[in-house]
Image (tube, helix red, strand yellow):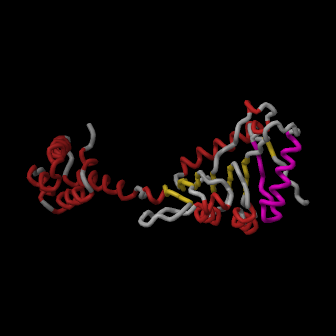
Amino acid sequence: MTCPLASLTDGSLRAVAGSLRSGVLAAGMSRSEIQRTCGAASGAVCEYFSTLYSDGFSSKHILAIVQAVLDVRTSVEPLSHILEVIVSGPDVPGLPVGDTFSAMHTLVQAAAREVIVAGYSIYNGKTVFKTLAERMDSMLDLHVTFLVHVGREGKDTTIEADLVAQYAKRFVLDNWPDKRLPDMYYDPRGLRMAAATRANFHPKCLLVDGEAALVTSANFTMAAQKKNVEVGVKIKVPILVARLRNYFLSLVERGDLKRVFLPDSL
């Protein structure tokens, strides 16, 4: 039997609780009082309360049940506190949305233990990742990992190790703003010789401390972060963020993603 209290509005629940505490229902069962406070759901609530009374529940016991339903409702975080739509592109009046660049940097500035950046395309990285590099400098225990796409163009026959070394050099010279470097891994399937068997590492995610994430269509470029029309979601649901984190780290641990050794000095 589904508890009919779940179908009542917060206002009806508070009215029932007040009546059970010091009103008509405090003295016992009253169908007219339930009808007054519960409206269309009064029939189901009457049947529910009658069952509770016949089972030996007092008005105080039933009040505790009603109050528990109210407490659960008020303790649940509003959806807007745990999920936020993030958009880059022209503003539309009357549609308040977050900004990709700002959302990313707000998350980074709160990082204390770990940041995972999973991205396909990186450009203008010295600007895009400036806040992250500064956070690494100020938080020496902060562990930052990049998971990236390293690709092979067309019929290029350059060996995999050389393409990865070229990518690492470009990242350090052109896309990373500081001396303290992150860890980095890539998907080797993007470098297969046969074009038909290649695969792209295509996520665009930022995970912070296993508790918050930004999942977006925006690449880690200034055009994507500030100019292009891009859509994403900022997530503050630890159980969901943990699934993403575990997936990415499992790829590293199993060897599906391989280490990129970034040069310390160039």
Q: Residue at x 83, y 55 (%)?
A: 170
| Quarter in which the N terminus is drawn | top left
- Is residue 175 located in the magenta-colored stretch of the structure? yes
- Is residue 209 located in the magenta-colored stretch of the structure? no
Nearer to us in this view, 66 or 241: 241
User: Measured from the top left, where is residue 81 in percent x and y?
Assistant: 47, 60
> For residue 212, which quarter of the picture?
bottom right
Residues rendered magenta in the picture: 160-186
Nearer to us in this view, 50 or 154: 154
> For residue 161, which quarter of the picture?
top right
Nearer to us in this view, 156 or 244: 156
Residue furthest toward the right? 266
Q: Residue at x 32, y 53 (%)?
A: 68
User: Measured from the top left, where is residue 80 in percent x and y?
Assistant: 44, 59
Please indicate whether residue 154 sits to the left or right of residue 159 in the image.
left
Please indicate whether residue 140 sits to the left or right of residue 41 in the image.
right
User: Measured from the top left, where is residue 76 in percent x and y?
Assistant: 40, 55
Q: Residue at x 15, y 48 (%)?
A: 42
